[in-house]
Image (spheres, rainbow, N blue to C red):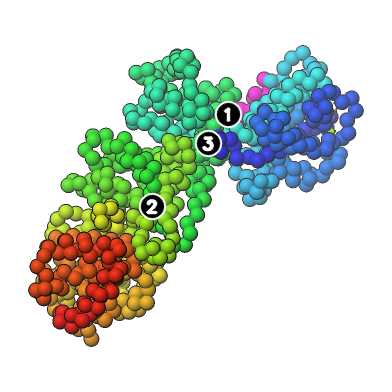
Amino acid sequence: MGQYTASQRKNVRILLVGDAGVGKTSLILSLVSEEYPEEVPPRAEEITIPANVTPEQVPTNIVDFSSVEQSDEALAAEINKAHVVCIVYAVDDDDSLDRITSHWLPLVRSTCSSSSSSTNTDGEPDVARKPIVLVGNKIDLIEYSTIDSVLAIMEDYPEIESCVECSAKTLHNISEMFYYAQKAVLHPTSPLYIMEEQNLTPACKKSLVRIFKICDIDSDNLLNDYELNLFQRRCFNTPLQPQILDEVKSVIQKNVPDGIYNDAVTLQGFLFLHCLFIQRGRNETTWAVLRRFGYNDQLEMCKEYLRPALKIPPGSSTELSHRGQQFLIALFERYDRDGDGALSPEEHKMLFSTCPSPPWSYSTDIRKSCPTNNSGWVTLHGWLCRWTLMTLIDVVKTMEYLAYLGFNVHENDSQLVAIHVTRERRIDLAKRQSSRSVYKCHVIGPKGSGKTGLCRGFLIDDMSKLLGKEFKTNVVHCINSVQVYGQEKHLILRDIDVRHALDPLQPQEVNCDVACLVYDSSNPRSFEYVARIYIKYFAESKIPVMIVGTKCDLEERRQDYLMQPAEFCEKYKLLPPHLFSLKTNKKELYTKLATMAAFPRFQAAWILFYKHRYLRQFGLMTEDPKVWLKAGLGVAAATVLGFIVLKAISATGTHSR
Ligand code: GTP
Ligand code: MG
């Protein structure tokens, strides 16, 4: 915390301009020496005030201008370099006052707009208009005030942040003048407030509405005392005193009748409060809130807040941490208004109302790629699955959306703690056990072989419902969880779309934790493609591969290929083909795929998994295959046993189909 509560400015550069003789040089020298200099040079040297003696703790440069010493080009360059321009006039000299509108304001505007593609001293592009402070000097010479004429100018030029009357001679308002200039840079009014309308700008309102929603933990559109206190603590690190809270509420009540409801602050009340801060010159309060919620000086969410640097070593992957999951569960429960354990399209939309747009479409993405309830609505499990998927394939987007949803504020931290970076794959391979809990499986096969049905079948209880279905929406990923030795693992099935049989696969289409190569066992022309893909892309790789023959409820056909699938698998030391059908509704395929991904380089163990099938086929085994399976897959036993079993299967393999 703290990191985002201050403006990102590292320094403030203040330029003084104005007609000759108005007292620019005197003002600067009075500030520095705290006494009025009788004799002044035409131009003061640039001075730097160290951070610790400025009210806002930011190093500040003050730059003088002299028309005698400097050319128009030099002035233009200084205007561009400055963060704020103080236009000085002498209160006793009407000409110098007139020249503000006839010369100085237009000059600053045109200088900045003609070089808007340039950058200022921080290397940031100049987007907003340069803030201006109007300074009426020599107030010691007159008995009246020029403030009325100046206020009229202020209305016409929104870039004017403030105006001040002062005297270099008596030192009246000198430090205030520099403080206002500093504040105009660090806590500018114009992005927040429209003077003519006496109202917040649309961008400011929008940001505050988002903040209100994030702070409204029980989603009742009100901030109660508990929520206000939490908000205060998060933004300012201090609790709210009960009597101050009461005062704030009564001020709101007096000014906006619907600002308080049931002794809690409504959105209107919250917006009014910020309007009031700004009108009373307390912009810094509103800015502190905005910055705490990630906004930069242009009221955009800043890059560092949305996308903090995360180091992902090659071969590592990204998953949600426990804290990330907890946050998402709480969010789900907050927006599951009717408590039915699922998000309706409306609830889903409300949940993402603090984001520019939802990260995925409800109808064509999340409800098609994750488990849903009977009405096709996203369950808590499906919700976590979808986030798990995004975190694996696009962790930056996960971090962005966590920030939009208020993670950083709620958890008082950056969203980096919501992400777990797994150890590198080569360490997993060396230890023969994966530490991950999310695996990516690519489902590859010729057109019409049943890839999509196999992927979608993972999401529903009764796969037979998918028989004969035409899949209209193009969903790339399907994700669900399975138990691998009592641990929950997420498995992502990616449907690799094959356009033409001879199209090469891209590296990102090959690279995965386990490959599922699918052929249609009822179509004699189907296996050839799978065999070719295997030989070309997987035979030499370390990626575990499972060959799957689909539609096994139909009559199996001999494949027009030089080897039958079982022979092929034997030759390449693969598991025998897994026969799959939507009709029989058996889910063991998914568990097997996850197991293969979880135990890389553990071919022997997977083959054990299969051994019972062979033994049973040849009448060699009568006991319950599950018992076999558990014993055989004990991690210690499997490494030794594996070798023997592998041989045994090679020897009996010729008898298989
Ligand atoms: P240039 O460098 O020529 O552009 O002028 P400047 O704006 O730097 O003005 P400078 O500081 O040189 O002051 C001009 C005259 O005004 C000097 O004689 C100052 O002593 C006088 N002066 C400056 N500030 C004040 C003030 O607050 N009150 C009074 N009475 N005179 C002042
Ligand atoms: Mg001067």
Q: Residues within 10 Å of mark 3 (few under 14, many from 20)?
A: some
Specify whether residue 377 is in view: yes
Amino acid type of the residue tagged 1 in the rendering:
Glu
C-alpha separation, residue under disc 3 versus residue under disc 2: 25 Å
Q: Nearer the viewer, residue 120 or 122?
A: 122
Of 606 and 332, nearer the camera is 606
In the picture, measured across the screen, residue 136 lies left or right of residue 267, that is right
Is 227 on the left or on the right of 158, as rendered? left
- Answer few, some or many: residues within 10 Å of disc 1's Cα (few below 14, many 20 plus, some between 14 and 19): some
Amino acid type of the residue that numbered disc 2 sits on in the rendered structure: Glu
Label 3 SS? loop
Residue 185 bears which disc, if any?
A: none
Q: Nearer the viewer, mark 1 or mark 3?
A: 3
Is 205 situated above or below 616? above
What residue does disc 1 label?
284
Residue 200 makes an appearance in the image: no
Q: Residue at x 65, y 23 (%)?
A: 151
* The image quarter in which residue 181 lies: top right
Q: Earlier in the sequence, mark 1 or mark 3?
A: 3
Q: Which residues, given as a range, are shown in magenta?
A: 148-158
**Which comes before the other along the chain, label 1 or label 2?**
1
Question: What kind of element bears circle 2?
Answer: strand
Q: Residue at x 33, y 28 (%)?
A: 220
According to the picture, the residue beneath numbered tag 2 turns out to be 319
